[in-house]
Image (tube, grey):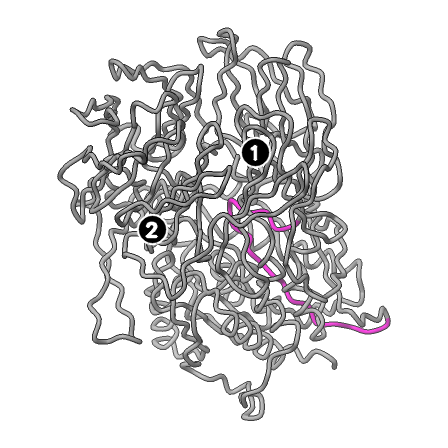
């Protein structure tokens, strides 16, 4: 999955500028402190360090568990916050000293975009009495009543706590084990694990692109485990060498490039106490992607499958006793199927099966809006639960006793809200309506309290606890240091298709002046950038304060609008997004005369870096300078599940790949272009930037290159600040803010 811009953290240390631009004077290159806002944002990770996260109400509704770091560090602690007396208790603290992670654990964290350290994850038993805390492969069992801590022997990957809290399922040496947490007894559940054969881990495509991090799932009765076997022996092997450590051997990764072999997967059921594996049979060739697993009380084991082209989807139920499967629902889309967008909030995976065999809930984007649907037990659509104009975002809770559900929805494109829906009458009742983005999580079976991680339109970020009426009963304690950087953002629409747009003006803005413009861009599928949350634009505000007007636009290909708008990019990733961004910019320039469209720069990271390179090369009449971070230059070198969703395979759509390839146009570069890339990036491999630099060299085109150690994410605060500084320097040299 391609990341957003440098709004997401970057990792480790800065090396050097490999090629220096003639545009930058010697004085510009002298060491100096970056602007204060860049340093502040880097130190606090845009004020996010010290905020409670991964918060969950205990099943009795008495307490809330959450993780939290300090305001200037990434070391997570586990806390319990008691609601009756508002007291705070530390349950687990990170171990001292550096973490020593296996290659497998590093890769798993990279796929999960986990850049924090310390207690990076915890799981709670069904009764809330036991918590499993995870720290770099070391596990601890914690009793929530008195905080008793029991270390669990061994190094484990991808641990999963059983619902009853008595057994652990986890991976060691690529095989799956169960561990009795009372006796400490280990039971090996699978054999044959190797560098190419794994049990209990999600394969690359699922972990990176399908938002499925798990490779093992417990039955509700804690007796059986469903697990994935992934055979990577036919997947291309890539090697990454770290030039900082030439004595170290290269690290091998199995990476499925577009049009090449994915891992071969199959799924089995095994008794937690050991025994033979019962393999589940479906046509793996026709349906290679398992996107979702749902296994809850009072409902069947259900899985959501996709074909490789991701144009067809199946919902199957599985009989754990016989391993027999039953097709419950099927749907298709000529462009691509989007899985349930639960990642947009803290919601639970669908389907949700209703009590008394009353059917199940499902979500689909069949028309203009995502909609939540009620289906009959045999899979037929009974009715749509979300009314027109109220787009489904995430499923939060099902209260069987009152026959109601709690759902996150969107009534406009910038905010979301939470509603109750009566399943008997269909009545929709507003529940949480404050403007901004709500990320709601309700513990299964607990209806009296919920966690609302809220980024408000007023510019605050809080982790709130709400009661059954939606009233705030507690604010989880934060130690974050909000940046002292007022955000001056205007939300509007622009262009012939009324693209959502955010305009960020400098703190000392004067309507009588003309300002150069910087397009802060992503413009790729899967990510909407314009939200009514000022804290999303802190980096943009810092740049704007250097003398710019910064603009962000959501054009075709981005989600959150409607089906056809998002899927317009099928077969060609750049032509429509590029035209839309230009149309939006030009419309804003006609409306706001303070925007000097003769001085426009562009910057972005990952897909935004790709867009930046394309924009700078293909439209020099619009964009006078570009700063491209970690660009996927040739999508034939990017992974199967992402790329084939939008472009098909290189074999089936060679023209689409040619048009979407930066190298196709490299010999026409006319404007200054700065490329940034981590040399050990295992998401967008460094070969992408190397291919581009070679093409530019062969064409005799000057360019600039900033080499960064580390991977796709670079959280080191010093480096983050220096990267922001270098970007601003490069833009300044061309756009001349203040003139």
Tag nearer the camera, 2 or 1: 2
- Residue name at image x 24 percent, y 41 percent: 263
Element on which disc 2 rests? strand
At label 1, counting other C-alpha atoms closer than 10 Å, the crowd grade (few under 14, some 14-19, many 20 or more) is: some
Span highlighted in magenta in the image: 512-530
- Residue annotated with mark 2: 138
Residue 461: horizontal and vertical position, in percent?
68, 51
Tell me if residue 238 can be seen. yes
Viewer-closest of 194 and 331: 194
User: What is the magenta segment's predominant secondary structure?
Assistant: loop
Q: Quadrant of residue 278?
A: top left
Q: Which mark is residue 563?
A: 1
Q: Which mark is residue 111?
A: none
Q: Is residue 697 left or right of residue 715?
A: left
Residue 520 within the magenta-colored segment of the rendering: yes
Viewer-closest of 65 and 516: 65
Q: Are marks 2 and 1 in contact (CB under 8 Å)?
A: no
Viewer-closest of 595 and 141: 141
């Amino acid at each position: 999955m391609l990341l957003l811009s440098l709004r997401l953290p970057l990792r480790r240390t800065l090396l050097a500028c490999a090629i220096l631009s003639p545009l930058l004077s010697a004085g510009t290159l002298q060491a100096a402190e970056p602007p204060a806002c860049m340093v502040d944002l880097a130190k606090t990770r845009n004020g996010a360090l010290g905020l409670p996260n991964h918060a969950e109400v205990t099943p009795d509704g008495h307490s809330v568990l959450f993780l939290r770091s300090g305001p200037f560090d990434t070391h997570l602690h586990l806390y319990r916050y008691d609601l009756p007396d508002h007291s705070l208790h530390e349950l687990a603290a990170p171990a001292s000293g550096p973490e020593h992670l296996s290659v497998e654990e590093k890769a798993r964290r990279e796929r999960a975009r986990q850049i924090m350290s310390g207690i990076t994850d915890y799981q709670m038993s069904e009764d809330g009495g036991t918590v499993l805390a995870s720290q770099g492969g070391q596990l601890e069992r914690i009793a929530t009543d008195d905080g008793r801590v029991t270390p669990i022997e061994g190094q484990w990957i991808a641990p999963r706590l059983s619902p009853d809290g008595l057994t652990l399922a986890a991976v060691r040496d690529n095989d799956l084990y169960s561990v009795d947490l009372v006796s400490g007894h280990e039971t090996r559940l699978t054999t044959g694990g190797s560098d190419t054969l794994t049990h209990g881990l999600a394969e690359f495509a699922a972990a990176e692109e399908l938002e499925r991090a798990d490779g093992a799932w417990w039955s509700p009765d804690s007796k059986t485990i469903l697990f994935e076997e992934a055979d990577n022996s036919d997947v291309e092997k890539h090697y990454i060498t770290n030039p900082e450590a030439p004595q170290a051997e290269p690290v091998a990764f199995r990476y499925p490039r577009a049009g090449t072999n994915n891992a071969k997967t199959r799924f089995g059921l095994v008794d937690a106490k050991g025994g033979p594996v019962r393999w589940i049979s479906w046509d793996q060739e026709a349906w290679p992607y398992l996107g979702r697993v749902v296994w809850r009380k009072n409902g069947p084991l259900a899985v959501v499958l996709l074909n490789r082209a991701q144009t067809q989807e199946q919902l199957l139920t599985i009989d754990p006793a016989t391993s027999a499967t039953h097709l419950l629902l099927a749907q298709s889309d000529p462009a691509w199927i989007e899985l349930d967008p639960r990642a947009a909030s803290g919601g639970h995976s669908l389907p949700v099966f209703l009590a008394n065999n009353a059917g199940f809930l499902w979500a689909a984007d069949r028309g203009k809006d995502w909609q939540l649907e009620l289906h009959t037990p045999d899979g037929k659509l009974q009715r749509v639960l979300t009314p027109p104009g109220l787009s489904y975002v995430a499923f939060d809770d099902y209260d069987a006793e009152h026959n109601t559900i709690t759902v996150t929805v969107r009534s406009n494109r910038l905010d979301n809200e939470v509603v109750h829906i009566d399943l008997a009458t269909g009545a929709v009742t507003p529940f949480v309506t404050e403007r901004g983005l709500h990320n709601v999580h309700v513990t299964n079976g607990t209806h009296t309290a919920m966690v609302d991680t809220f980024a408000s339109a007023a510019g605050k970020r809080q982790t709130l606890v709400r009661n059954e009426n939606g009233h705030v009963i507690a604010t989880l304690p934060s130690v974050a240091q909000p940046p002292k950087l007022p955000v001056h953002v205007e939300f509007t629409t622009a262009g012939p298709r009324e693209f959502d747009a955010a305009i960020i003006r400098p703190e000392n803005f004067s309507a009588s002046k003309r300002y150069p413009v910087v397009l802060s861009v992503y413009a790729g599928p899967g990510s909407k950038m314009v939200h009514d949350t000022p804290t999303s634009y802190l980096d943009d505000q810092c740049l704007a304060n250097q003398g710019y007007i910064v603009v962000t636009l959501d054009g075709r290909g981005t989600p959150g609008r409607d089906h056809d708008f998002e899927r317009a990019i099928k077969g060609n990733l750049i032509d429509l997004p590029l035209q839309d961004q230009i149309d939006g910019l030009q419309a804003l320039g006609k409306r706001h005369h303070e925007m000097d469209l003769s001085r426009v720069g562009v910057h972005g990271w990952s897909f935004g870096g790709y867009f930046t390179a394309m924009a700078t090369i293909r439209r020099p009449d619009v964009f006078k300078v570009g700063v491209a971070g970690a660009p996927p230059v040739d999508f034939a070198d990017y992974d199967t599940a992402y790329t084939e969703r939008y472009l098909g395979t290189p074999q089936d759509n060679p023209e689409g790949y040619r048009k979407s390839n930066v190298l196709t146009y490299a010999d026409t570069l006319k404007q200054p272009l700065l490329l940034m890339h981590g040399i050990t990036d295992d998401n967008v491999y460094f070969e992408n930037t190397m291919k581009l630099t070679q093409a530019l060299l062969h064409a005799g085109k000057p360019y600039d290159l900033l080499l960064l150690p580390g991977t796709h994410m670079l959280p080191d605060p010093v480096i983050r600040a220096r990267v922001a500084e270098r970007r601003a320097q490069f833009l300044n040299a061309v756009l001349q803010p203040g003139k």
